[in-house]
Image: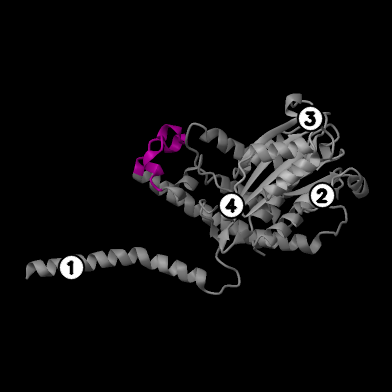
Amino acid sequence: MKKVILTTLALLLIVAVALSFSLPTLLRIKAYSAPMALPEIEQRDNTNAANEIQIALILDTSGSMDGLIDQAKSQLWGIINELSKAYKDSARANVRIALYEYGNDNISVQKDYVRQVLPFTTDLDDISEKLFALSTNGGSEYCAEAIHSSLNELTWSQESGMKVIYIAGNEPFNQGSFSHKEACEMASQNNVTVYPIFCGNKQEGLNTHWNDCAVITKGQYMNIDSDIKVVEMATPYDDSLDVLNYQLNNTYIYYGLQGRSLKEKQVKQDLNQETYSKANKVSRTMSKSSKMYSNEKWDLVDAYKKDKSVVNKVNKSTLPDSLKSLNDEELNDYVVSKNKEREKIKNEINRLGVNRTTYISKNKESSKDLTLGDRMVKTIKTEAKNKGYEFEK
């Protein structure tokens, strides 16, 4: 009789434990299947290549392109903020960005003055750092070679939900020994859409073949005034968001051999945007509160979200001095508390960010002089929607 009772109790315990794991899962499934005005959007499963957006940005860094590079630097986080809103089937899009420069005499002639600055990456601080390190120098601008190099050197996924190249410059598109039409045909065969952006008069761009690639790959030809200085609009919410950014940075716990230097990079990129204005820095702050901004390779809090056992495996000698003497349990509790603190700060940034966006949309003066960021955001959203993506309001 005693054995029967013990066996029954054991079975009940197993059922209770099983339910404790399965019930949250069932609730999550129900939450996604129920009709919602604004769906709960989670970070995508990284194995799902069909939900990946790949964007290669190719910039002319010849002597006359200081204005173009300046626009790219100042508008990077506005572009990121829009991309962070993209989702498909209630899953957050995984956005990977690559960076190339061309037309610069500092690049080897054997490389046709084309250089890969960054392969496809999700590291937003790395993109910002490399972008701010770009400088201009007179050179020969070979658009075809730049496109060809990006197609050959980058790891383009065959299953990717969206693959695009943005190439911007101000010299004839057909310069160089490699056929620009052949490069564009190659892009088309790999389902890569090309968006050529001519820095100058629209008709001049048409006369110098900048539209050819758009026609071949079903992209869109655009022109901009690259000399327009771009500064984000100041809003009544900027001071509060700037304080929150400081608080957000204090929730990051560096670890690993490069952890400290990468944490310093985070702060450096804040300062880079502040060279334009506090409003530009705030635009970056909003990006840092999004799912796109993740630093698990050097931040213990982000790493903990991926793998809770990281606190047991981390080399404590690489942690900040104040944490080196903590045992595993103490470190775990500290990481959990910092994660809660970060989520609270992010929620407040997002709340104020909505108010900031509304303020800008109501007070921004309309302008016909569209910049690099304006053109990219508009076409990215159009292209993404055609590929089945939606954007949060």
Near mark 3 (Cα within 10 A), the count class, few <14, some 14-19 or many ≥20, is many
Residue 104: assigned label: 3
The amino acid pointed to by label 4 is Glu
Q: Amino acid at mark 1?
A: Leu
Task: Tell which circle, 4 or 2, labels the residue nearer the N-terminal end.
Answer: 4
The span picked out in magenta is 308-328
Q: Give the residue type at disc 3.
A: Asn
Element type where label 3 sits in the image: loop
Q: Earlier in the sequence, mark 4 or mark 1?
A: 1
Q: Is residue 9 left or right of residue 185?
A: left
Res. 9 mark:
1
In depth, the one of 78 and 47 nearer the eye is 47
Marks 2 and 1, Cα distance to the nearest angstrom? Answer: 70 Å
Image quarter where the N terminus lies is bottom left
| C-alpha span from label 3 to label 1 | 75 Å
Image mark for residue 371: 2
Q: Are marks 3 and 1 in contact (CB under 8 Å)?
A: no
In the picture shown, does residue 182 fall above or below 112?
Answer: below
The Cα atoms of the two marked residues, 2 and 3, are separated by: 22 Å
**Residue at the disc numbered 4:** 159
- Assess whether mark 1 and mark 2 are in contact (beta carbons under 8 angstroms): no
Judged by depth in the image, the label closer to the viewer, 2 or 3, is 3
The local crowd at label 1, few if under 14, some if 14 to 19, many if 20 or more residues have their Cα within 10 Å, is few
Residue at position x 85%, y 49% from top?
223
Q: Position of residue 328 (x, y in %)?
A: 35, 42
In terms of image quadrants, where is residue 121? top right
Tell me if residue 327 is in the magenta stretch. yes
